[in-house]
Amino acid sequence: MLRGGTVSTDGGPGSAVPRRAFVAGVLAAAGSATVFVLPALLVWVAASESTVSWTSSLGVGASLWLLAGGAHLTLGAAHVTVVPLLALALSVAIGSWAATRAAREAADARTIVLVRDALHRPLALALGAWAAGYAVCALLWVLVAFLAGPSPVVWTLVLPVVVVPVVAVAIALGRLVKGRPQLAGPGLRRPAWFPDAVRRALRPGLEGAAALLGIGMLICGLFVVLHFDRVSHLQGELRPGLVGGVVLALAQLSVLPNLALWAVSFLAGTGFSAVEGASATWTGSRTSLLPMVPAFGALPQPGAFPGILPVVVLLPVAAGAYVGWRSLRAVARLSTGRTKLTVAGTAVVVAAGALGLLDVLGGGSLGMARLSDIGAPAGKLTVALLVELGIGAALVLAWDRWKLRR
């Protein structure tokens, strides 16, 4: 009688936690895709003169969801590789929240059963089942996209199908272990193969990258405000209607981090290209025939910039100083100079590498011909940020060394 009236969460054969987590993963992927599929269907309903079927709109919505997850699309000879980074971040954030909820029951088990001194077994099963459910549902949307929408590039499907749920599970695991450290053994909390300097440098480096990205977003928002008349004029010329206007505004908002990377590249001195023939660097801005994208109305007017403009490079240098200061906070005050230099240098590499990786992930093609190569040059941007962030961090380290010698 006691056995029959007890609910077990210790990962035994009769545990229903993994099954519920699998269903939760399926629902999470379905709900995330609905954010793209539903607007596509609403636009089809609102467009009374549309000649495409509702299944095509469904396929377009599925393809856009895969694009938001990192996949690339092909439409005839055109290739679309611009991944809306804000939509990607929201997908991961919502997924991590859903995975945390799905694994909460397993994490709250009274008895901790560690597997190979690494992770609580029921928690591992629940998170694995959630990721599997998400991937299965994502594969169904892949099938819909291949049947009725722009075709995804096969090798890029690993991002929305595998990488997104895995990253969401990793974030959820971090939250659960932070709330209850007993869920993870020392082999997982501090693995022997992970250098201590890298572990200490991760947070300062990511914070520095986030600070620069935030500065880029502020610059983009400022330019939209300053040139709002041009932006609103382009929006009006498109005549998208109420539903189409809302969808268009949300689509442009979803690529705000992409545009912020353009701004960061301009600050770093490597510039950016809106289309072939339209670019902006420290020396000036060139223009060309631009696509009817309202946000492009906020681009700088063509012409030469003031000679003092390169002073904007002080912003990446200041971000490097912040990275250096946070790196010093991550080590003991009286640590050796070599330790501080190693942590700060690693943090600079993390910050520059993270922004370069985001630029690569964000893609650089909106079609073909003049739209086939747009945005910031990821390689040059990473190298420039390494130098500029390194200068800022070096100044902070020198100041710290001078204070200790006084």
Image: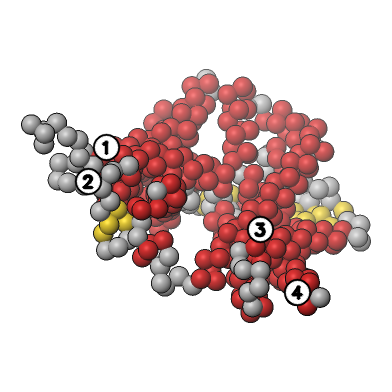
Residue type for callout 1:
Arg
Q: Circle 1 is placed at which residue position?
A: 20
Alpha carbon distance from label 2 to label 3: 41 Å
Alpha carbon distance from label 3 to label 4: 25 Å
Residue type for callout 2:
Asp
Is 337 on the left-hand or right-hand side of 306? left
Q: Position of residue 209 (x, y in %)?
A: 64, 57
Q: Earlier in the sequence, mark 4 or mark 1?
A: 1
Alpha carbon distance from label 4 to label 1: 57 Å
Density class for disc 3 (Cα within 10 Å; few <14, some 14-19, many ≥20) is many
Alpha carbon distance from label 3 to label 1: 39 Å
Residue type for callout 3:
Gly
Q: Secondary structure at mark 4?
A: helix
Is 174 on the left-hand or right-hand side of 345? left
Q: Quadrant of residue 31?
A: top left
Q: Earlier in the sequence, mark 3 or mark 4?
A: 3
Q: Earlier in the sequence, mark 4 or mark 2?
A: 2
Cβ atoms under marks 4 and 2 closer than 8 Å: no
Q: Which mark is residue 10?
A: 2
Q: Circle 4 is placed at which residue position?
A: 404
Q: Position of residue 241 (x, y in %)?
A: 62, 23
Q: Can you name the residue that lies furthest to the right here?
A: 307
Alpha carbon distance from label 4 to label 2: 53 Å
Density class for disc 2 (Cα within 10 Å; few <14, some 14-19, many ≥20) is many
Q: Let me know if residue 273 appears in the view.
A: no
Density class for disc 4 (Cα within 10 Å; few <14, some 14-19, many ≥20) is few
Residue at 20% x, 40% y: name it: 8
Q: Let me know if residue 119 appears in the view.
A: yes
Q: Circle 3 is placed at which residue position?
A: 208
Q: Position of residue 72 (x, y in %)?
A: 48, 52
Say which of 303 and 266 sits in front.
Answer: 266
